[in-house]
Image (cartoon, helix red, strand yellow):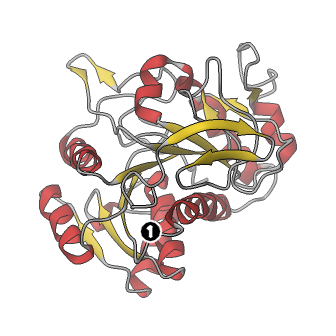
Amino acid sequence: MNSREDTGASATGTKAMGEGQACCSSQGHEHGQEHAVAGSCCGGGGAKSGGCCGGGGGAASEQVLVFSRRQIRELDRLAVEEFAMPSILLMENAARGVAGVILEGLQGIENPAVLVVCGPGNNGGDGLAVARHLANRGIRTAIVLGAAEGTYGGDALINLRIARKMDVPIFEAGMAPGVAMAAATALLGEPVVVVDALLGTGLDRPATGAMAELIGQMNGMRAGGCTLVAVDVPSGLDCDTGEPGRDASGSGPVVEADLTVALAGVKAGFMTSTAQRHVGELVVVDIGAPRELMSRLGRPLGAPEQGGCGQGRCGS
């Protein structure tokens, strides 16, 4: 089965979507640019002040769930094996949710441009699908690939091929990520939004090489005024520990997102103070996984963590 987990490692348009101002409520929350967000706040041990969970068109009463790396892997696997859901359907649902949040944030901005940085795994596949949804809505969009095109496979490759057929501009980072980012920016002009779809929940070691350089490039663009939106997990962050990916040589760079659009649920590591500096504002979007499976594997936000998966019924 093609798991979706990766193992790689304002009105003026400035920070248009990352400035969480105040409130969460059953009707959503308010920003300089509003997002389509409904649901529970991540207050307390959750996201930083102003951050919200819930969204993607979900009902305000829906419960926000928390998942570990293992649990989200099981969610993907069992959605395919037990419920006969094609993995690409999960990716498509995720991408539509992320694109919807971005489009809400772009309202009122004239002729915005979006740059989407996509790794070779399924987080990158999500980004590729997000890019084509944005392009379909008339948003000037370009893609930077974080690896050689030949390394893309599965659902990510399908979405890459679709994006090429749609003539979405694609730049391959290869051995010169800075050159690819500069070329994409030269085509688009300064993007309003940069989308981080480089690395996913599978990262448990430092980002290195081209991946590390692209993280630095995205953070630099954010410092220059672009809004940085992470898909599911800020690249370089261990989703279980909430710390930068680490090995014996030390820790690696992490994306400093204005907004993280988490897929299916909050990741366990987001509860740490370290993670909150990287996650920014937090929105959760639905990926269409069966409600019964979600409840089996996840735990309600604010509930004490238990051993195993969710309520202890991971499945086999």
Say if 238 sits above or below 55 in the image.
above
In this view, the residue in front, 216 or 200, is 216
Badge 1 density bin: few <14, some 14–19, many ≥20, Cα 10 Å: many
Position of residue 88 measured from the top left corner of the image (x, y, whole percent): 62, 64
Position of residue 280 measured from the top left corner of the image (x, y, whole percent): 47, 36
The kind of residue tagged 1 is: Leu
Quadrant occupied by the C terminus: top right
- Secondary structure under tag 1 reads helix
Residue picked out by circle 1 = 157
The residue located at (38%, 86%) in the rendering is 167
Query: How many numbered marks are there?
Result: 1
Q: Would residue 25 be found to the left or right of residue 228 on screen?
A: right
Q: Would residue 309 be found to the left or right of residue 70 on screen?
A: right
Would residue 52 be visible to someone looking at this image?
Answer: no
In this view, the residue in front, 270 or 153, is 270
Say if 274 sits above or below 287 in the image.
above
